[in-house]
Image (tube, grey):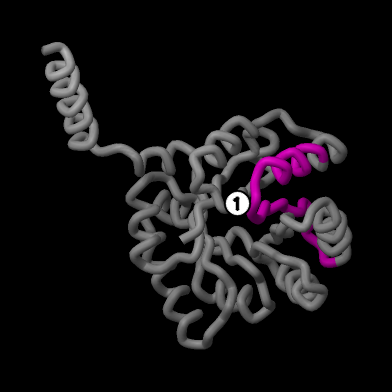
Amino acid sequence: MKFFIDTANLQQIKEAQDLGVLDGVTTNPSLMAKEGISGEENVINHYKAICSIVDGDVSAEVISTDYENIIKEGLNLAKLDDKIVVKVPMIKEGVKAIKYFSSEGIKTNCTLVFSAGQALLAAKAGATYVSPFIGRLDDISTDGLSLIEDIRLIYDNYGYETQILAASVRHAMHIIECAKIGADVMTGPLSAILTLLKHPLTDSGLAQFLADHAKAAGK
């Protein structure tokens, strides 16, 4: 299972990269705005900075919603770095654009997916990744993890190569359950990844080991 971090914060990306488990980055306009990144030139430079930190794929989202401008914007993003994955919304014009990008060998991430039917269309169009938003489904009292299960079953039935990128991951159990189901990738905040490190028995065990060592060394 690949680990992506969902942020535009360079410090957090560096921290995840230094941990040695980072496989890529996902971003979106909201995350860019959160970091105070605005204006086309600044956004482009920020994507370049992210690509300079990580070794894996970096999803860069288009703003346009019509076919011609999605293509134009996506081509410009793809030129920035071989690591760039063009992130396209699950809309009619977006599916058409994904088909075009796929035919040109440009990697894509179909985002804002909330149903198995949408995921099926994304795979048919040749998306590299499909991003079901499990946390947002949980927010409206719908089981986001069951969507991951449905997509996994459908993709396995027909041998689709589109990777399931579990998005809107909120906490450690989301990550564990997605891994059990067989999601190819998870993307979430650094806090969710770091939570996997924690267990009270690890903390108490380490404290005991260190205390015993100090006691023995003092004799």
> Up-down: is 77 above or below 125?
above
> Up-down: is 42 above or below 47?
above
**In the rendering, at what x and y percent does residue 142 appear?**
38, 59
* Residue 40 location, quadrant: top right
Residue for point 34% across, 64% down:
180
Residue for point 54% across, 48% down:
22
Residue numbers of the magenta segment: 45-67
The residue under label 1 is 24
Q: Amino acid at mark 1?
A: Gly
**In the rendering, at what x and y percent does residue 47 appear?**
75, 43
As rendered, which of 130 and 96 lies closer to the eye? 130
Residue for point 73% across, 42% down:
52
As rendered, which of 199 and 55 lies closer to the eye? 55
As rendered, which of 25 and 152 lies closer to the eye? 25
> Up-down: is 12 above or below 93?
above
Tell whether position 47 is magenta.
Answer: yes
